[in-house]
Amino acid sequence: MQWVIAPMTAQDVDDVYEIEKKCFAIPWSRESFLREATENACARYLVGHADGKPVAYAGMWFVLDEAHVTNIAVHPAFRGQGKGEAITKALVQLAADSGMHWMTLECRKSNVVAQNLYHKLGFVDVGFRKRYYADNNEDALIMALEHLPPGNPENDPWLVREQ
């Protein structure tokens, strides 16, 4: 199986939206993903393609020097194969390449699998958001990655280069 991670394009949005609906009780809308891909200058999204088909995605927003993770999802049929770890690592590297200094995210308190992955990648627990998730009022664990890897700005696909 060929596995490629690339920036999300408008052509990926329908597949990303289908993954979103399979993974989350209250999914983002298709229109939200389209805006993230085409209009939001602060958004960066990656899509993992298995044999050319999107099966995972990860996104973040840039706020000053912070990369805030908005969502990470892997199609249920492709879980347990390291794709979540691979796309999360790629997102962390993209944040570093883009000049960000740290990352934050929220994770359901009950999602121990995701927490274990984030801890493995160096995220630490920094707080809670009470009743953060609207579907069941579950608390969110706030996690932060305070030390990003060395950045390589030349690898940032969104970098604007003067001619």
Image (spheres, helix red, strand yellow):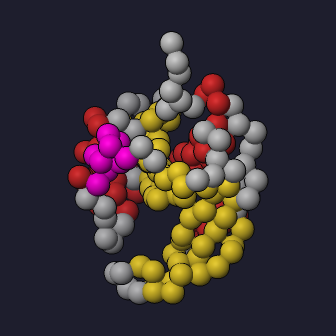
| Residue 96 screen position, x and y as percent | 66, 42
* Relative vertical location of residue 116 with respect to residue 33 in this rendering, above or below: below
Q: Is residue 160 above or below residue 151?
A: above
On the image, the x and y values in percent for residue 145 come to: 69, 59
In the displayed structure, would residue 135 be above or below residue 25? below
Asked which quadrant contains residue 51, the reply is: top left
Magenta span = 32-40
Residue pictured at 74% horizontal, 44% vertical: 149
Q: Residue furthest front?
A: 162
How many marks the image carries: the answer is 0
Q: In this rendered view, identify the residue nearer to me: 61 or 71.
A: 61
Q: Is residue 73 left or right of residue 104?
A: left
Residue 18: say if magenta.
no
Q: Residue at image x 60%, y 73%? A: 142
- Is 34 magenta? The answer is yes
Residue furthest out toward the top? 163
- Residue that appears at 53% across and 51% down: 62
Q: Can residue 136 be seen in this view?
A: yes
**For residue 15, side relative to residue 147 (left or right):** left
Q: What residue lies at 60% left-to-right and 39% top-to-bottom?
A: 98
